[in-house]
Image (cartoon, rainbow, N blue to C red):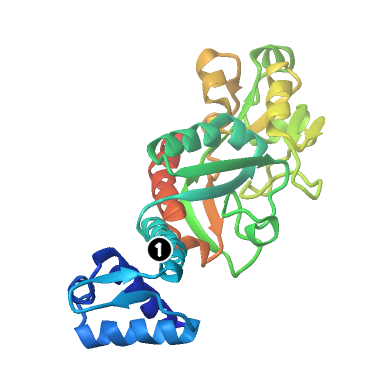
């Protein structure tokens, strides 16, 4: 196959130059090498492709036909190589990203829009889903999560921290009273978020912190809406409710209680980490995610 490619290139350059010697110069080869390749090509095809004389070289009818086809094939191959080389060194192509419903709607969607705007050759697909699968099974290039990877074969890169806060609507706290200690929480209504298995999300919480569920959902946006409506005390990521706390729509409960922050992590397969589009996206998110808190 390599010999066929060399023969093809030599013939196309001969046809373009109209001379064996000029083609040899352009190719950086000796005249005998170019002449031998042309002869091998003609022998393999069983037809004469060029007419030779001491002063001029011209294509036969078969040579003209072959030149049109071979020249186009060579040009297509060179364009394909250029495209791949460009993608190898610069971000291009489709990047498929998955994250939770709330984070996708309220934060990651905006960040990825800015990333795509800065990288015109990258097409971003964002899936905001209730339950995160691992990228091997889901076909995503990147999963943004708040938990450890489900498979040890995945690369887990920390992007930042996810501070959390207990909060409730002022109307609820005026009605039920403001908790003064952790033990007081057991006497309050709670709005809780469930994981994909239906269990209350408690990762990193103190063992003695009771969160009896009055209302439960697997959608953090629904839980926020319930809290805003005065349904009870809710545990939220700070990025989910920062604007509500600032506006007074929600009020921090036990603000001096230190709740451990969860990590914001990027999960991806090792082979995906070599693509420029994913590398650039990870660098971008590593600078942007810490500022969300």
The image position of residue 275, as x and y in percent, is 45, 59
The image position of residue 160, as x and y in percent, is 46, 46
| Snapshot quadrant of residue 125 | top right
| Snapshot quadrant of residue 38 | bottom left
The image position of residue 231, as x and y in percent, is 76, 21
Q: Is residue 212 left or right of residue 128?
A: right
Is the residue 280 above or below the residue 14 in the image?
above
Name which residue lies at 23% across and 88% down.
Answer: 32
| Snapshot quadrant of residue 189 | top right
The image position of residue 3, as x and y in percent, is 41, 84
Number of marks in the image? 1
Q: Is residue 59 left or right of residue 53?
A: right
Closer to the camera, 192 or 21?
21
Q: Mark 1: give few (<14), some (14-19) or many (20+) Cα within 10 Å.
A: some
Is the residue 224 above or below the residue 125 in the image?
above
Closer to the camera, 82 or 13?
13
Is the residue 37 above or below the residue 166 in the image?
below
Q: Is residue 2 left or right of residue 15?
A: right
Closer to the camera, 97 or 12?
12
Closer to the camera, 96 or 64?
64
Q: Is residue 238 visible?
A: no
Q: Is residue 38 visible?
A: yes
Which secondary structure, mark 1? helix
Name which residue lies at 32% across and 75% down.
Answer: 51
The residue beneath circle 1 is: 71
């Amino acid at each position: 196959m390599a010999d066929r490619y060399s023969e093809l290139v030599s013939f196309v350059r001969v046809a373009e130059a109209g001379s064996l010697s000029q083609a040899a110069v352009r190719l950086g080869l000796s005249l005998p090498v170019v002449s031998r390749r042309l002869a091998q090509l003609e022998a393999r095809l069983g037809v004469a492709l060029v007419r030779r004389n001491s002063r001029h070289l011209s294509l036969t009818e078969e040579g003209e036909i072959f030149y049109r086809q071979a020249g186009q094939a060579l040009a297509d191959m060179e364009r394909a190589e250029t495209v791949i080389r460009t993608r190898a060194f610069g971000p291009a192509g489709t990047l498929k990203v998955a994250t939770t419903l709330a984070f996708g709607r309220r934060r990651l969607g905006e960040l990825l829009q800015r990333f795509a705007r800065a990288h015109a050759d990258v097409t971003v697909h964002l899936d905001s889903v209730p339950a995160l699968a691992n990228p091997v099974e889901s076909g995503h290039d990147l999963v943004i999560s708040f938990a450890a990877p489900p498979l040890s074969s995945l690369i887990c890169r920390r992007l930042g921290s996810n501070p959390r806060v207990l909060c409730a609507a002022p109307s609820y706290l005026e009605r039920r009273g403001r908790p003064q200690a952790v033990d007081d929480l057991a006497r309050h209504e709670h709005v809780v978020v469930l994981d994909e298995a239906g269990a209350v999300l408690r990762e990193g919480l103190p063992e003695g912190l009771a969160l009896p569920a009055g209302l439960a959902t697997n959608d953090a946006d629904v839980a926020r809406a319930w809290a805003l409506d005065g349904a009870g005390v809710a545990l939220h990521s700070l990025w989910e409710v920062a604007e509500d706390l600032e506006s007074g729509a929600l009020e921090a409960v036990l603000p001096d209680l230190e709740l451990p922050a969860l990590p914001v992590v990027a999960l991806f397969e090792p082979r995906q980490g070599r693509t420029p589009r994913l590398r650039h996206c990870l660098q971008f998110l590593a600078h942007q995610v810490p500022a969300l808190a």
